[in-house]
Amino acid sequence: MKKPYLILIILLITIAAVAFQFKPVKKVVETVKATIETPNLIAKDSLSILTRVKPPKGYKRVNYPKGSFQEYLRNYKLKPFGSKIVNYDDSEYFWQGGHIGVLEVPVPKNGLQQCADALIRIRSEYLWEQNRKDDIGFNFTSGDYCSWKRYAEGYRPKINGNQVTFNKVARADHSKENFYKYLNLIYTYSGTLSLFHELSEVDDKNLKIGDMLIKGGSPGHIVMICDEAINEEGQKLYLLFQGNTPAQSVHLVKNLQNSNISPWYQLQKDAVISVSNYTFSSSKFVRFK
């Protein structure tokens, strides 16, 4: 067998092997096609979600108030097109074919900021910037609520099995540096399972930017809606971004099931929805308080 043909066969086998990781995706051909092709809805020279991705023909973006969480996410800054997903240890993620943008979200070297944690960080930073600091708080997997307000006042959790108590053991510190120490605590004791039980479920007919698709568990996964478009028939499409495990760059994902509208997604309750590294089933949509 001639060498060029051997190389081509090896390449096709490799692509097929990657494609089959996204079970239960039904159309492997679409997965391979979406991996190789750059969607024509992408503006490569743009540095925000809003300007990087254009709506498909016949769709327009849904309007949201200035200063809202929805507008905050839609205008989130991106690294230059082609930027790679990097793990917390500065190594490159093993597969770079499933995203069309990397968000300007630092990845801590401690490895704690995994999939749910990345979205917790983005939500918390929005509340911080909006001077809504007293609204920052999340449940541990135990169900115990841990707020930034109490942490800033010096209260720390004492954990004994499933029992959690809070005691004042540190001086008050409301600094941004201490805020990120608080988030590291949340990353340690919260995750997809705690968010799955803590947050209210949202019907697929009422989805909006900032809502999340979640599968709680170990491992579970979660992605966040970061843009929304609608056509004259009222049909909606959505963009999704995600963090991952191991902790790595937050990234805007391609639609590996439908290259015609990628990176936009149609989202429905109980649908099997695949992103670059995970396939959602028996999951639900939730919303931050």
Image (cartoon, rainbow, N blue to C red):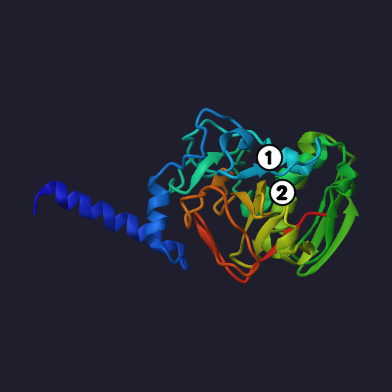
Q: Residues within 10 Å of mark 1 (few under 14, many from 20)?
A: many
Identify the mark nearer the N-term, 2 or 1. 1
Q: Position of residue 25 (x, y in %)?
A: 46, 65
- Residue 209: give its label: 2
- Residue 74: give its label: 1
- Residue 65: give its label: none
**Total tally of numbered discs in the picture:** 2
Q: Residue furthest left?
A: 1
- What residue appears at the point 89 percent right and 55 percent down from the top-left corner? 167
Q: Is residue 26 visible?
A: yes
Q: Position of residue 67 (x, y in %)?
A: 81, 36
Answer left or right for 215 relative to 126. Answer: left
What amino acid is found at the position of numbered circle 2 in the picture?
Ile
Is label 2 in a helix, a strand or a loop? loop
Q: Is residue 180 visible?
A: no
For the residues marked 2 and 1, what is the alpha-carbon distance in whole angstroms? Answer: 8 Å
What amino acid is found at the position of numbered circle 1 in the picture?
Arg
Q: Position of residue 284 (x, y in %)?
A: 68, 66
Disc 2 + disc 1, Cβ < 8 Å: yes
Q: Quadrant of the C terminus?
A: bottom right
